[in-house]
Image (cartoon, rainbow, N blue to C red):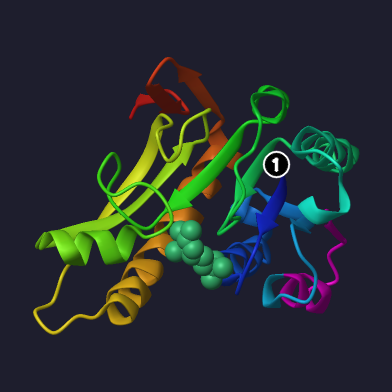
Amino acid sequence: ARLVVLVSGSGTNLQALLDACADPSYGARVVAVGADRDGIEGLARADRAGIPTFTRSVTDFETREGWDAALATVVERFEPDVVVSAGFMKLLSTDFLEKFLTLNTHPALCPAFPGMHGPRDALEHGVKVTGATLFVVDAGVDTGPIVAQVPVEVAEDDDVESLHERIKTAERAMLVEAVGRIARDGITVDGRRVRIGGRDR
Ligand code: GRF
């Protein structure tokens, strides 16, 4: 399966996918990495791996729709089977999402704590268990059909950073595992039900 990965930051999820894709039996390869800004570590990781990159910044376009269409155009060139939004901090339009099956990771157990501050909000709420979610992106914020989840315990002395780091470790493993299965067995989305291969998820 051909993956286009979108990043906005450090790209550790991207790196986990790149490492997994080094094994041909994984069944997927990252054919391009896209970003919404230049100069980020995620793009440097792609460069080091010899993978083509592209950047489309919202500020270079007059309208959000123009940006979104330009992003879709460049993504389309790489003919992805799946787009993985891995720490990509922009919402994608329904036009984009209708063209490409797009997966996103969120550092909380959806539908809890959607948005930009999953780890902080979980900590402030005082939950004892949070985690990470892989989902099919829809028009909402972290609302799409769920592909995979992993629980992470909150430690008594956690701060936002320590909790987010522990979530990210679990998140990367979940992402690699699920994307590999999707690459090998396929994915179908029927309403809120997601199936990988023949099995019910
Ligand atoms: C991940 O926790 C992701 O879920 C969140 O931002 C983080 C991105 O990390 N939206 P990285 O850029 O993959 O290191």
Give the residue at x 38% y 71%: 169
Residue 14, position as x, y percentages in the image: 62, 64
**Is 158 displayed left or right of 199 in the figure?**
left
Most foreground residue, 81 or 115: 115
Task: Find the residue positioned furthest to the bottom.
Answer: 157
Which residue extends farthest top? 190
Q: Magenta span covers which residues?
A: 43-56
Q: Position of residue 124 (x, y in %)?
A: 18, 65
- 174 left or right of 125 in image: right
Where residue 28 sits: x, y (%)? 67, 49
Residue 184 horizontal side relative to residue 100, left or right: left
Q: Is residue 114 magenta?
A: no
Is residue 55 within the magenta segment?
A: yes
Q: Is residue 120 left or right of residue 106?
A: left
What residue is disc 1 on?
1
Give the answer, above or below, for where 112 lies relative to 197. below
Q: Quadrant of the N terminus?
A: top right
